[in-house]
Image (cartoon, rainbow, N blue to C red):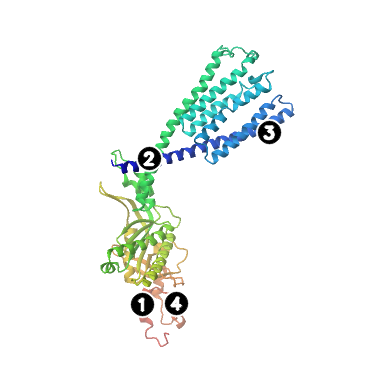
Amino acid sequence: MEPQDLTTKKIYEQTEEEELDDHIATVGNLAVYQGCYWGTICGSFGTINLPLLMKWGVLEGFELATLGCALGTTLCLLTRELARRRLLQGPLGFGMFGIFVNFPTYLFWGCHWMSSEQDGALTYLFGPLTYLYALVVLLSAFMFNKWLCISTGTLAAFGYAFAGYLAMPHFDKITTGLGTTTGQDMTSLVMWVNRVACIMTLGPTAGALATFGRRLATLAVAEARQRDNTRRLFGEYVSAPIADLLLAQSQHDDGDGEPNLGSIGQQVGGGRTECVMLFCDIRSFTKYSETTDPEEVVLRLNTWFDCAVKACTKHGGVVDKFIGDAIMVVFGGIVPLHHPSMSAAAAAKEMLSECSRLSQIWEQEGKPPLRVGIGLHKGLAVLGSIGSSERKDFTVIGDAVNTASRLESMCKKYKRELLVSDTIVNDLPSRREWEYLGPAPVAGRENPVELYAYDPDFTTEPHPPDGEQKLRDEDWSTTSPPLREEGGLFHRLPASIALEKIDSIRNLDYDME
């Protein structure tokens, strides 16, 4: 391996290690933050209630315990603030855990110093205060540093041993003498050595847990990093939702070691799902490509695709693929949408707006304008992966796809930029801006499609398809002129019906203007 490769690998490993340390520091500080949060609540509760209980005569001689609660609450607040800022790492982390784990030792020493003639350190030695040693040692495991755990456990053991040493002169005040179950002498040196040894073993035990947890965190971070890199690579060629589906499905197989990519559609919507398909194609692109440098063609395509994709994704669409100069977009099915037809229509309108904007820019630069055709249709489709065992492609298949593609092609015939079927218009809150063109035969379909064209200047509600036959049967020979003037009934009719009626009024003796 070349030196440069070794340097690159070293930099990559350092970056990965730094990312792992950052992740572990975040998790550890969060755990300490939560622990100190509840510690603050408990300490505040003791600081407030112990004086009240002493005042009411329920307790006596708990002044030092009250002071301990107050100091413990202050220490919890300080540690909590450091954890909130993610500062509990490195030397500062070792120092704070060293202070925290020996907090009971400070209280035992305070009891020895303030009441040496009474019970001294023995006052709280057998109380719940000693549990704090074990609690802090176990809490250190969340920092995923075995040496921190071992050092914390060692300090806890020495602190407890020191507290026992301070309490030794008062062992004669232990009234039980012998344990009721084991018969062991509670004042025996062997008994105290066993207690100290048990506390010391907490450090290596917590350290083993921390090591195992760090290994799991390393695997998790490495997997997440690999997944992000793969998703980033996928995202350059397929839409992010499709990349997520492929990555999720690649985690499962059929027992043969190969990802079961063919069942993605079943994960999304049971295989068959209702969705809205959008097809968009550039007009006269072949002719333009013949007379233009390939680099210029690619640059212009990418500029348009960038605007078109942003418009589609803004409204919840998922770009399935680019087919030459055409775009195939899915609304619903892959990404759930409340109103896929409305989202698709809004995206198509925004695409036309972007097309107009780019055309103005390119015309000013002396380039030919951009003209597109868009088709929309809603229906059932199958989402899934197709291809060979070596090469697969995620796609959408079904009548909705074929019909939307045909509608896009029919834009040339009708000289419109956006054609949709009645499956789209029927889902819209209003039919304004949608001119009804009548039933239109579509290649590959037995039944014609009720066709609508987008026209922002068409502000009159068109007649619904179910009233078409009534309009055809109407006798226009007695119709008054205003109904045929601009804005009247004649201009509200679908083009197919209006053409049929022209002959019926051609020979009437009144002015058509």
Question: In percent of the image, x 40 and y 66: which residue is there?
Answer: 352
Q: Quadrant of residue 321?
A: bottom left
Image location of residue 400, percent across then percent down = 34, 58
Reading the chain from its start, which is encountered first: label 3 or label 1? 3
Classify mark 4: helix, strand or loop. Answer: helix
- Indicate whether 123 appears above or below 287: above
Viewer-proximal residue, 211 or 98? 98
Q: Which residue is mark 3?
A: 48
- Indicate whether 214 appears above or below 236: above
Q: Are marks 3 and 4 in contact (CB under 8 Å)?
A: no
Image location of residue 362, percent across then percent down = 36, 69
Residue furthest out toward the front: 3
Question: Which of the two marks, 3 or 1, is nearer to us in this view?
Answer: 3
Inter-mark Cα distance, 1 to 2: 74 Å
Query: Within 10 angstroms of label 1, few (less than 14), some, or many (20 or more) residues?
Result: few
Q: Which residue is mark 1?
A: 499
Image location of residue 112, percent across then percent down = 65, 21
